[in-house]
Image (tube, rainbow, N blue to C red):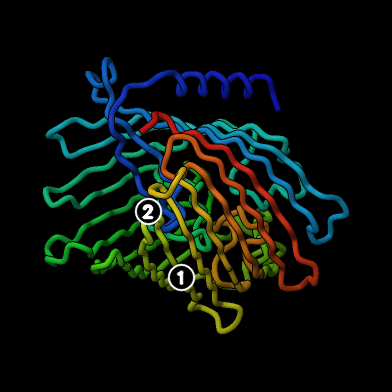
Amino acid sequence: MSAGSGYTLLVLAGLLMAPGPAGALASVPDSTAGEATAEYFAPAAGQLARLHLAPYGDLRARGDGVRHRPGATTDLRRTQATLRGGLAWARAGIPLRWETGARACLGTDRHRDAWAPFQNEATDTLEADRLGLEVWSPRRDALLLGKMVMPLRLTEMLWDGDLRPVGAGVRSPLAWSGLPDLRLAAGFFRRGRLSGPDGQVAAAQLLAGVAQEHRLSAEVLFAWLDFGGLKTLARDGIGRQNRTVTVAGTPAYAAAFRVADLQVGVRTSVGRVPLSLLVDLARNTTTGKDRDGLRARLAAGGPSAPAGAEVAWVYQRVEREVVPGAFNSDDWWFHTRMRGNLLSVEVGTGSAVRLRAQGFLERRDDVALATRRLTVELRARIPER
């Protein structure tokens, strides 16, 4: 890593971790349902308040170990530190918010490493994290423009929550329907690059919530995603277990990707301990084989549990042509053509600082030996609640 990039990260961390104003925080929902990595804006005091500005910050330190990678004779160990930070501008009485932020990352990885194409976030980089505008109607319908957090709620089987898509989106509570738990999100987005060729997706999602008595609630989310502009990704070697072919001497994806996705979530609690189950089913409608994905997440605990502790188990089965592997989470070593289990233990869920350990046992369809992965992550969100 370069001395210049290291100095930049330390300066940004120092600025963000300086004591900030007190006050309650408003969360910005993450794109992943049930696996929130929400970032926060805070009501500011002093000079920032006079300028109608509110800061956000997210500092993560992570250790990662991978064993039994197909074709590898040695284990992989690496570390990474990532800092996201920025400001949002909003003024009472004006239905508009503007936000800008940067992401800086340092790690032991190198861009030339053989596994680099498996990662969505490059190390030793300083780049834009958010650069967007949000405008509301009197009924709280919102238009979003720029580089943003994905406005659809998608599990990591379909979308990596660390990606910041670029494009235009809408969010609506569908107030005209008279149903308080019906919402819509849609948009057209590039995968993350502000300029140059990149993959893209047109997507729409409808969410219906059902609240019941005895601490039981449920929600159903249906999404349609049409992926395009994939030639550049295939040419850059980001097939990630998808089937590729050679067309006129150039790699290309063998399948198109138009995906129907259904999520069903149920939440309840036993005393102070929340319980939740989320099942996600996906199908690529353009092909007749290797087209289905299943993800199930069962969790106990959360912010209201003692010490904010949460234990979660995830099962994931992603066939080869369900989704372009360039878009879904790289927390799993295999993006598609895989099956596996994840056990996660986290302390401090919902607080400013949290510690999480995750163990993965997953297998690519064409190999007999399972790949094992362990990640330990310490995360601080700034400012504090």
Q: Nearer the viewer, residue 347 or 220?
A: 347
Q: Is residue 143 above or below residue 82?
A: below
Q: Is residue 375 left or right of residue 68?
A: left
Q: Is residue 223 visible?
A: no
Q: Is residue 360 left or right of residue 18?
A: right
Which residue has dot 2 on it? Answer: 272
Say which label, 2 or 1, has the lower sequence index. Answer: 2
Q: Residue at x 46, y 43 (%)?
A: 307
Q: Nearer the viewer, residue 271 or 10?
A: 271
Q: Is residue 242 above or below residue 149?
A: below
Indicate the quadrant where residue 315 lies.
bottom right
Mark 1 Cα within 10 Å, few/some/many (few <14, many 20+)? some
Q: Residue at x 59, y 48 (%)?
A: 120
Instruction: Residue 115 in the image: state x and y as whole percent.
Output: 73, 50
Instruction: Residue 61 in the image: state x and y as whole percent.
Output: 60, 35
Check the image and name the residue furthest to the bottom: 288
Q: Quadrant of the C terminus?
A: top left
Label 1 sits on a secondary structure element that is: strand
User: Amino acid under label 1?
Assistant: Val
Instruction: Residue 227 in the image: state x and y as whole percent.
Output: 48, 64
Q: CA distance from mark 2 to mark 1?
A: 23 Å
Which residue has dot 1 on it? Answer: 279
Q: Is residue 249 visible?
A: yes
